[in-house]
């Protein structure tokens, strides 16, 4: 596409974004250079800024620019409950429900043997220490209901079992607003077992 | 997603990329910060570099860092033929066929009345000057076969009609490798009319 090394370099760099192939990268580069150079400069600045300043919260591991994030520092939070999620996006989803006022631990990943990611890679040791602070009484496992998320939840509950903590898992069941006819059978079977 | 202004700024900046919504932008930001900070820095540098150095070729309008692109400067090219395309990506597609050795004019857009883009916005005046250089004998209209591309081709052919140039359009027909059953009827109708 044209004879510009800077343009080729930009297309290659855009391909490092997840889910962006060569066609998408070309379209993005074309759009930015033809219609939105301000956007290109703003994105360059935001990338440099975030790369330099965003760290992990020392207590819950989520992204923050401070040593400890504002959620962990909030005195109105219930420190006896610790909700374990895979990513900041999952944390945000739990947060948006408004139904949880405890603290979080963000794994920043999940155990995935197929990708060679084991318990050590996602820092479970740090979680076990965090859960043993003497305040936490209940650990709520809110990893995803995928094979990897379930395996991660299983390994965490194994690791925490002997510490006298209550270990719970998000309820499985039929999603709100759904029709039974279109819900997969595994979900219906779980909802039957956990009926109340 | 976490409490970081730099992260929020990065997500907002990523949303300026075409086809990227808030979920994709969050996933991209998360991936770069968690797994590929080198990639984030490389992308920041590539964006700044391309924004600063990539210009338009004075002759064909494609992206280049030089005043005139290498294609326009290539003495082995046939200067009597000028192929008009919408974007550098389209130019690249024609180039990859290996079937064309003439020069190009890249519109960097198309006429789109619905988006308020008229003949002036895509620099047709510059194309008419370029085509009137006394060397160009044939203008090949290779705009896309969409409503906007057809309208653009029509307006260009109207504008060039009185200049004694041969105006041609890419042939319409059944794509190589396709089965008639799955080809739309308009395409088959055109292929029947243009049969040879």
Image: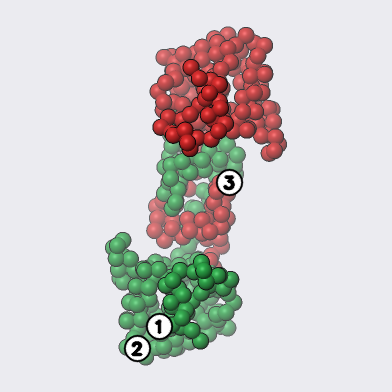
Chain colours: A red, B green
Residue to which mark 3 is pinned: B39
- Categorize mark 3 by other alpha carbons within 10 Å: few (<14), some (14-19), many (20+): many
Q: Position of residue B100 (x, y in %)?
A: 55, 80
Quadrant position of residue A134:
top right
Q: Is residue A127 left or right of residue A173?
A: right
Quadrant position of residue A169:
top right
Q: Position of residue A112 (x, y in %)?
A: 66, 34
Q: How many marks?
A: 3
Q: Position of residue A133 (x, y in %)?
A: 58, 12
The residue at 46%/83% (across/down) is B194
The answer to whether mark 2 and mark 3 are in CB contact below 8 A is no
Chain at numbered mark 1: B
The residue at 58%/15% (across/down) is A167
Q: CA distance from mark 2 to mark 3?
A: 51 Å
Q: Work out whether residue B146 or residue B129 is closer to the camera in this orientation and state it.
A: B146
Mark toward the start of the polypeptide (2 vs 3):
3
Same-chain status of marks 1 and 2 = yes
Chain at numbered mark 3: B
The residue at 48%/73% (across/down) is B68
Mark toward the start of the polypeptide (3 vs 1):
3
Disc nearest the viewer among 2 and 3? 2
Q: Examine the rendering and report whether any part of residue A175 can be seen.
A: yes
Q: Examine the rendering and report whether any part of residue A29 can be seen.
A: no
- Categorize mark 2 by other alpha carbons within 10 Å: few (<14), some (14-19), many (20+): few
**Element type at marker 3?**
helix
Q: CA distance from mark 3 to mark 1?
A: 43 Å
Q: Work out whether residue A90 or residue A63 is closer to the camera in this orientation and state it.
A: A90
Residue to which mark 1 is pinned: B131
**Element type at marker 1?**
helix
The answer to whether mark 1 and mark 2 are in CB contact below 8 A is yes
As displayed, is residue A64 above or below residue B151? Answer: above
């Amino acid at each position: 596409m044209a004879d510009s090394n800077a343009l080729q370099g930009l297309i290659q760099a855009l391909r490092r974004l997840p889910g962006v192939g060569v066609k998408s990268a070309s379209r993005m580069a074309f759009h930015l250079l033809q219609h939105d150079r301000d956007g290109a400069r703003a994105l360059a600045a935001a990338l440099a800024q975030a790369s330099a300043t965003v760290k992990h919260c020392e207590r819950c591991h989520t992204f923050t620019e401070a040593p400890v994030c504002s959620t962990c520092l909030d005195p109105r939070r219930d420190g006896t409950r610790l909700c374990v999620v895979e990513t900041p996006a999952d944390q945000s989803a739990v947060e948006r429900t408004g139904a949880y006022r405890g603290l979080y631990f963000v794994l920043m990943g999940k155990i995935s043997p197929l990708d060679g990611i084991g318990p050590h890679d996602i820092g479970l040791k740090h979680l076990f220490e965090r859960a043993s602070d003497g305040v936490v009484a209940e650990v709520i496992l809110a990893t995803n209901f995928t094979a990897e998320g379930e395996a991660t939840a299983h390994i965490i509950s194994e690791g925490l079992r002997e510490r006298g903590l209550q270990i719970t898992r998000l309820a499985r069941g039929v999603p709100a607003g759904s029709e039974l006819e279109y819900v997969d059978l595994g979900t219906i079977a779980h909802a039957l077992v956990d009926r109340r």
